[in-house]
Image (tube, rainbow, N blue to C red):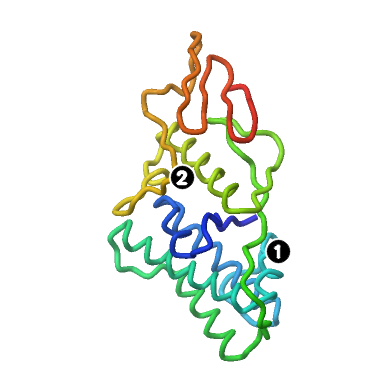
Amino acid sequence: MGNLFFTDKNPAVCAGNLPDMYLAPVLKCIARIKSTFLQSRGFVAPYKPVKWASDYIRWLSESYANAEWLYEYAQALQSEYSRAYEKTKVLKSFKIVVACLQLAKKTNAPKWKAAPWTPPPAIFARGFDGPREIKGWLEFNDIAKNRAYLNWKVQCHSIDEKNPELYSWSNRPTPNFIDLLPKYIPRYRSAPMSPASVGNLRFTSKYVTTPFGRNRT
């Protein structure tokens, strides 16, 4: 299922909380949701419909305020992308979001209800234990849990050190709930090591304690 990383009620703050590499994929996720939403109403849209968007389609159908929040989130993601990469290019995904909204308004296809805004639906995703996945699916249904999940993923990216864009906020402030790990902490360690609290992690020789449970490294 697509993940919008609902880390704040304010869509602009929500977009600013994402590291550089997450901006374009989340914007594409929104474009696919919008496309699927219009196709469910009998219209032709740029992207093919996706099954994982069904919860988002119900959420969008509940209120115009929900659709407006998602559009503002897409706008903020485009703005954050331009700021992070110092580019004026408008991403294809954002053009699709705009086109879908214009079509919806022009035809009044969705027939939105005048209901108040509600948070996006909960998502189910795998947590990570360093380079290893935690077994089972975890539900992230509020801001606090989504922030913890994003923080955990960023920490794992910083440990792997494969692509700095996965744990960087270029030309942007790092969110206050993100705890980046010091580079001197090893991913694996055979010799005994006294527990050292670093953010949400406590490393020992064999185990790592996470916000989602205690697992072997």
In the displayed structure, 120 sits above or below 157; it is below
Front-lying residue, 198 or 82 = 198
Amino acid type assigned to the residue bearing label 2 in the image: Phe
Front-lying residue, 80 or 8 = 8
User: Residue 196: x and y, percent?
Assistant: 47, 21
Front-lying residue, 189 or 28 = 189
Residue ID at (61%, 72%) = 117
Amino acid type assigned to the residue bearing label 1 in the image: Asp
Q: Nearer the viewer, mark 2 or mark 1?
A: 2
In the displayed structure, 51 sits above or below 95; it is above
- Do the residues under discs 2 and 1 have CB atoms within 8 angstroms? no
Q: Which residue is mark 1?
A: 55
Front-lying residue, 145 or 155 = 145
Q: Which residue is mark 2?
A: 177
**On the rendered structure, is 128 left or right of 42?**
left
- For the N terminus, the image quarter is bottom right
Q: Secondary structure at mark 2?
A: loop
Rendered image: mark on residue 80:
none
Q: Quadrant of residue 44?
A: bottom right
Q: Secondary structure at mark 1?
A: helix
In the displayed structure, 5 sits above or below 40; it is above
User: Residue 159: x and y, percent?
Assistant: 44, 31
User: Which label's residue is closer to the chain start, 2 or 1?
Assistant: 1
Residue ID at (66%, 83%) = 114
User: Residue 69: x and y, percent?
Assistant: 54, 71
- For the C terminus, the image quarter is top right
The alpha-carbon separation of the residues under discs 2 and 1 comes to: 27 Å
Residue ID at (33%, 68%) = 89
